[in-house]
Amino acid sequence: MSWNATVLTLFPGMFPGPLGTSLAGRAMDRGLWSLEARDIREAATDRHRTVDDTPFGGGAGMVLRPDVVDAAIAAAVPEGDQRPLVFLTPRGVPLRQSLVRQLAAGPGVVALCGRYEGVDQRVVEARGMIEVSIGDYVLSGGELGAMVLLDACVRLIPGVMGAAESAEEESFSSNLLEYPHYTRPAEWRGLRVPEVLLSGHHAEVARWRRERSEAVTRERRPDLLTHSPNQDQGRAGAPLYPADSPA
């Protein structure tokens, strides 16, 4: 059974984009996962296909209407669909590898891409969306965030990457940044590869890699050393999946 992704967006032409190339693209061609991009505007009911309106309380910008977004979701998600609904927004929980692993282990994901000032909070809460952010910055919309989310998930689907152990040693796999890598030539521009990596002593190599991972994490991302997996849950600490979900 393949991993299925549905993206709800005002710009479906942005997909598959980079997801149609390299690992993700080859995996899609092999049927390991599927991607459907659906236009939110198709759910609008007036002749101008209006999807947004001014915010209550005043302020700049426009907000995506809850009735239109809800209708778009209803048209795209079959009754009983167990895939989690993820809303890409700067105000969401950080996208971490532990959350990616949970999503990748499930049946797929439905990603809602916000635009303008965002989405009416009522539909976010009514649909039990998981609000996710890919970083502390603001983009023009959620499409690039959705691509990041999907790429991170797809590469963990069994059969997508050539070596399963590659995923186990990557950055964030154990709340540590990955150790530095070296390859041939052993000396380049007067710089040599650390001798331990040339020694052939696997235990020493493993110890060196662990030490370098811990050192670079302390230097660059000390927050990872105190991060709790519970922070990767959805709204108000709710479980990521329903109780009867296969994940």
Image: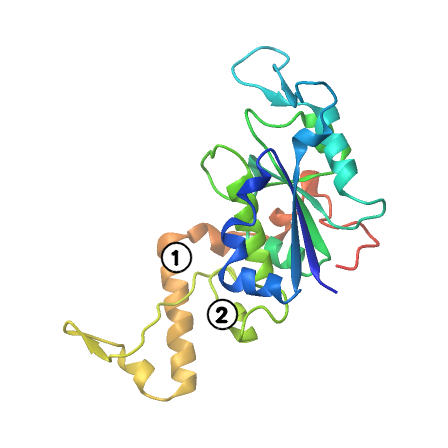
Q: Where is residue 123 in the image (x, y as percent from the top left)?
A: 73, 29
Above or below residue 117? Residue 212 is: below
Pointer 1 local density, CA inside 10 Å: few below 14, some 14–19, many at least 20: some
The quadrant holding residue 98 is bottom right
69 relative to 36, above or below: above
The mark lying in front, picked from 1 and 2, is: 2
Q: What residue does disc 1 label?
A: 218
**How is the structure coloured here?**
rainbow
Tell which circle, 1 or 2, labels the residue nearer the N-terminal end.
Answer: 2
Q: What element carries label 1?
A: helix
Choose between 82 and 131: the one closer to the eye: 82
Q: What element carries label 2?
A: loop
Q: Which residue lies furthest to the front in this view?
A: 47
Q: Point out which mark residue 169 bears.
A: 2
The answer to whether residue 97 is visible is no
From the viewer's side, name the closer residue of 84 and 48.
48
Compared to residue 195, the image places residue 160 above or below, namely: above
The quadrant in which residue 244 appears is bottom right
The kind of residue tagged 2 is: Glu
On the rendered image, what quadrant is the N terminus found in?
Answer: bottom right
Between the residue at mark 1 and the residue at mark 2, the CA separation in whole angstroms equals 17 Å
Task: Locate residue 130, reporting x and y percent.
Answer: 67, 41
Residue ranking furthest to the bottom: 200
Q: Which residue lies furthest to the left in this view?
A: 190
Q: Position of residue 82 (x, y in %)?
A: 79, 50
Q: In this view, does 189 lie above or below 8?
A: below
* Residue 159, quarter of the rendered image: bottom right
Q: Residue at point 59% right, 57% down?
A: 153
Viewport quadrant of the C terminus: bottom right
* Three-letter code, disc 1: Arg
Q: Residue at x 51, y 49 (%)?
A: 17
The front one of 41 and 234 is 41
